[in-house]
Amino acid sequence: MGFRFNKRINIGKGFGINLSKSGVSPSVRTKLGSFSTKGYSLKTGVPGLSYRKTANSKGCLLSFVFYIVLGISIYQTFK
């Protein structure tokens, strides 16, 4: 069995920094799920059940930037 380590440091308003054995990565948590440079996780509405996708750095970074822009625009719309 492998050893796992992760720690999240909250910056504010859903933004945070994840520390793990494999490195440091920024992330955003929303009502839909969480998004980071290493992958994303979407909530399904069923407690304890989510969809998680990990991808290579380039594709996932592009998704991360897209979801940050999307999240900011949605936040500004409903503010």
Image: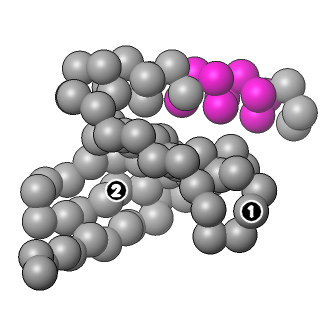
Q: Is residue 71 magenta?
A: yes
In this picture, residue 12 sits left or right of residue 18: right
Residue labelled with disc 1: 46
Characterize the local packing of mark 1: few (<14), some (14-19) or many (20 or more) Cα atoms within 10 angstroms.
few
Of the image marks 2 and 1, the number of the one nearer the N terminus: 2
Q: Secondary structure at mark 1?
A: loop
- In the image, is residue 52 part of the stretch drawn in magenta? no
Picture coordinates of residue 15, whole percent (x, y): 50, 50
Q: Amino acid at mark 1?
A: Val
Identity of the residue drawn at 62% across and 70% down: 48
Number of numbered discs overlaid on the protein picture = 2
Query: Where's residue 69, x and y in %?
Result: 57, 22
Instruction: Give the residues drawn in magenta, as a range.
Output: 68-76
Residue drawn at x 74%, y 62% is 46
Q: Please report the residue visible at 26 percent of the width from the left and 48 percent of the height from the top.
A: 25
Residue 8, located in which quarter of the rendered image?
Answer: bottom left
Along the viewing direction, whichever of 14 and 44 lies nearer the viewer: 44
Dot 2 amino acid type = Ile
Which quadrant would the C terminus be assigned to in this image? top right
How far apart marks 2 and 1 lie (CA) works out to 26 Å
Query: For residue 73, which quarter of the picture?
Result: top right
Whether 21 is drawn above or below 37: the answer is below
The residue mark sitting in front, 2 or 1, is 1
The quadrant in which residue 74 appears is top right
Residue at mark 2: 17
Residue 30 visible in rendering: no
| 34 with respect to 13 (left or right) | left
Residue 30 is situated, as x and y percent measured from the top left of the image, at 65, 48
Pinpoint residue 77: horizontal percent, then vertical percent: 85, 25
Number of other residues with Cα within 10 Å of mark 2, as a class: few under 14, some 14 to 19, many 20 or more: some
